[in-house]
Image (cartoon, coloured by chain):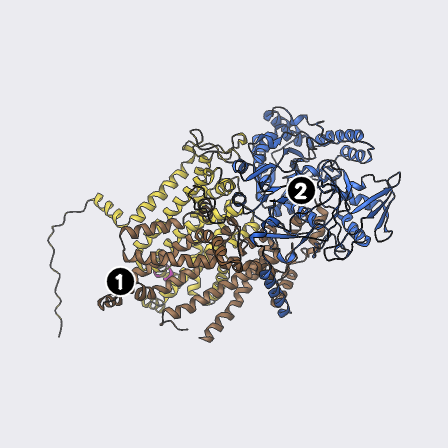
Amino acid sequence: MLAYILRRVLATIPIMVVVALFVFSLLYLAPGDPAAIIAGDQASPADIERIRVALGLDRPFLIRFGTWAWDVLRGNLGTSVFTNLPVTVMIAQRIQPTLSLMAITLTLSLITAIPLGVVAAWKQGSSIDRFAMIVSTAGFSIPVYVIGYVLAYVFALDGFDLGIGFFPVQGYTPIQDGIVPWFMNLLLPSIALGMVYMALIARITRATMLEVLSQEYVRTARAKGAGQGSVLFVHALKNAAVPIVTVVGIGFASLIGGAVVTESVFAIPGLGRLTVDAITRRDYPIIQGVVLMFSFVYVLINLGVDLLYTVFDPRIRY
Amino acid sequence: MKRRSFLTSAAAVGATLAAPRISLAQNARVLKFVPQANLSSMDAVAGTQYVVRNAAMMVWDTLYGVDSTITPKPQMCEGHEVNADFTVWTFKLREGLKWHDGEKVTTRDVIASLNRWMVRDTMGQRIKASLDALEALDDRSFRFRLNKPFSKMLFALGKSNAPMCLIMPERIAKTDPFQLIKEYVGSGPMKFKTDEWVPGARAVFERFDGYSVRQEPSSWSAGGKQMKFDRIEWVILPDSATASAALQNGEVDWWENPIADVVPLLKRNSNIRVDIGDPLGNIGSFRMNHLNPPFDKVGVRRAVMMALSQTDYMQAVAGDDQALWKVCPSFFPPGTSLYTEAGGELLKGPRDIEGAKRALKEAGYNGERIELLVPVDVPITKAEGDVTADLLKKIGMDVNYVAADWGTVGTRRSKKDPVDKGGWNIFHTWHAGADCINPAPYTALDASGDTAWFGWPKSDAVQKGISDWYAAPDLAAEKKAAEEINRASFENVTYIPTGFFLQYTAWRKNISGIVKAPFPVFWGVEKS
Amino acid sequence: METPYLAAPALPDVLPPRKARGRAMLFIYRHPAIFWGGLLLGLIVLIAALAPYLFTVDPTALAPAKRTRAPSALYWFGTDMLGRDIYSRVVYGARVSLLVGFSVSAISSVTGMAIGLCAGFIRPIDAIVMRVMDGLMSIPSILLAIAFMALLGASVPNVVITVSIAEIPRVSRLVRGVVLSLREQAYVEAAIASGTSIPKIIWRHILPNTLAPIIVQATFVCASAMLTEATLSFIGAGTPPDIPSWGNIMAEGRTLWQVKPFIVFFPAMFLSITVLAVNMLGDGLRDALDPRLAKRI
């Protein structure tokens, strides 16, 4: 097992190299650079050129990539072109909000979607099943920001005057400042972001449960007198867990895309917004640092998912 | 190396997490402000963005300031002495000026700051070009010795147009003028809390108790800057729907630039006050590249002006509220001392599409493809770009609408290459009225050809007018020079003004002391 | 001792001949998702195709004097911030959104299939290509898309290319998985052993088995592509604003959604219905073609 984990971790290195080279080339080729933005509107063309040179943006590709790669290997992700703050500091500032958002979204989605999927599978073909599936399909057919705006309107601005406008419209309260404010800030964004995730999980749960419920061991469990709840959640769900966990892992990547939008709408100072801002302003060190970090996290999540398989399915061994 | 940088960042994370938070009880001493754009850097001399300048004004002070009549008044200086022909200027600093780290402000800091500023600023460049010596006479006095008269010295030192002449500690001022400073220590009424800065999300300013306030009443950047808040938080909300909701919900106190369409909603809210933010307004700009065909021919440029409807542009930019915009057949803002409509006849009266089509043909337009650069992430320029695409199509020109972000446009517009090698024909922007009140800060007016602003217009008549203004002894002569400039600029079509528009500002009703100015004035504002 | 096998008794011909209409109704009853999804999608495609004939005006014609008018008899869906008719923009926008959805779906399916087939069969290619695909997948697709758009500039073909690149890794993984499992099958081993050329094996044995999961995946990719286009437009990295698409109508109107919600509402509704229809179609196809596929995404 340990050898497997080690092999997997080592295998991330070529992936990271590919990612680093790819992102770096992309940025190098993309038109526009931070010099013009730093210079501002009133600056002259000569000013912009001098700023470019001062930033070292006129050096050839390989030298720039080499310098950056060497720095990364020594743990230095560079400093932001605009703020002169280290990239690691800027990322560290933004991790907590994004992690919190992801955590709450994941929890909410799992809590709502899995029971929904299980019930839909149990009552397959009934109106509950149809309804659940339509609702979840609708969930990932509406753009995230539309859901976000509607939620903000109803639950934060109290647009329909129902007296339910307790939630804040925007912002993030760190967890050290109180669990309740932290949660209140994140609930509406999590629901908006989680709709898609919830829909995916509900569907895959239903599909896998359908297959599992038709297996012989379920009949055996029923014959042995196990209650319906126990059959569904203890016997069937555990066996259905592997594909569900797979989807949770894969869906995580798409969650990041939705997080970018959600962070914009609800003004959460997270990594998604940091990256989009950095891309728009061509703040190369941040873009490179963040993308490298995301890909590392993604690989870790995949590893985690694969390890989770062994928990749910004893037949799987590495 | 690896461990050290890891520890540094871990410490930084720890510092961020452990930073003190203000409890609800102290709310009245905290102001939450939503700026017009993201504060991406804090160097207002190397970078000329308005947002950066607005923030820097709190942290750094200037030798002189300007009041609401745009008259320079002493700020860090006690006063000045100048000789009869404006070639020797002597200044003396006030007593008791301190930096945020407790050190005294000396003339060494002033001279280093002046040297850095003079490299980047147009007026500063003029001073530098005729500078014989800039020397410190003692710890508080310094002198400029010029070999050519320069009567507008006080305005140069006190103007609020970017880049402002901000006074920084010597060690910071020694940074190359083309590189961003890394330390943000000043002598202004607020300290910048670098450890609480989350770029793109929040910037925090804290009261500097060692600031010595002038005794005069405050007016724009002149007079006594009495700071009534302990803490000012800039909350960056790029999504204006979110900003509007946050203001209505009381989560922020002051929104610099609400979009015009949302303003009726805000006005209906009894907890919110709305008013014009900057009486000097803005002039929209339709800027053509004078180097590339077809706009290298003045006839083609004038033909477009015949069909251009400032009404269309202004409605697209400023909305339905007629109080927010005016037709402006002038390069100077309406209501200012140099405003003149001389030469702007083509922009007045009903638009002539057919006449424009004919004029195009006569001027020699051969169906060349127009590269129209539109920064679509900035609402004002996007609106202008959309109207232009429609306008050019109406008069029969072939338009390539290049949708890009501001950064890309900013880089591409600096290229003088022909269009097929990555050049451009048209881009849009706007200029704050304060930047257009007279030729001194007005980089876009300059028509010196190769060294002019993007577009590189060339007109000796305009340049003569500008020199005449600099040499003008009184207001009447200045006005005459302005008329000359206006006429010549329209003749040559340096750029086409798309109209004059104002913007609102909005605040919660428990905030008082907000004044109309070209930049948000934070001193004198308080919360009940 | 042999167990006697009883022949099934011959059934009398008592069942009536099945009528065509009966079969159609049976199809609808058995596969409601395919029917309704397909119908809805077909309707939207029809609307998009017939755009000029549906009482629309030029969707790019500006009239700033008539900006942000509420829906009325003259402007069925109202006008936007530049005075353009929203109804016309939504109807013409259907063309762009559908084009993006279908193109991305087609391109990513074909390319992903090609890559997956090669990777499944040729070991060395498998190692390299899958590493590259992993690398691509580990970059969040939205960020990849924004970066590409910054590189290529805004235009509809570039949006298609960008979104396709983000979707190809998943399709190729799917195909590769199918190929790898099929390779172990006895009949494929037999075919290889008997000297059948690889291309023929692919054509005759592998390809037909990959079609079903690919078709299902293609519908989901189509839905995802349309939503990604809307998200990209929201961020400002989508189709250029002078070409109406549901995504950029919503993006332009979102700052006004509190005061003029109709600008966002109509394209949002159309987009949601179309994506819903495509998803339903995909669900139905998957249930019909192979219930076992329900486990794989």
Q: Chain of mark 2?
A: B
Discs 2 and 1 share one subunit: no
Circle 2: element type: loop
Q: As displayed, is residue C165 above or below residue C185?
A: above
Within 10 Å of disc 1 (Cα), the crowding (few <14, some 14-19, many 20+) is few
Instruction: Tell me if I can see residue B141 in this picture.
Output: yes
Question: Who's the residue at 73% across and 29% down the image?
Answer: B487
Where residue A51 appears, as percent x and y from the top left, is 70, 52
* Region in magenta: C201-205
Please state if A115 lies on the left or on the right of B116 as rendered: left
Which residue is tagged 1? A228
| Chain coloured blue in this rendering | B
Quadrant the C terminus of chain A occupies: bottom left
Residue type indicated by callout 1:
Gln
- The picture's colour for chain C is yellow
- The picture's colour for chain A is brown
Quadrant the N terminus of chain A occupies: bottom left
Circle 1: element type: helix
Please state if B114 lies on the left or on the right of B304 as rendered: right
Residues at circles 2 and 1 in contact by the CB criterion of under 8 Å: no
Which residue is tagged 2? B519
Residue type indicated by callout 2:
Phe
Q: Closer to the camera, A169 or B153?
A: A169
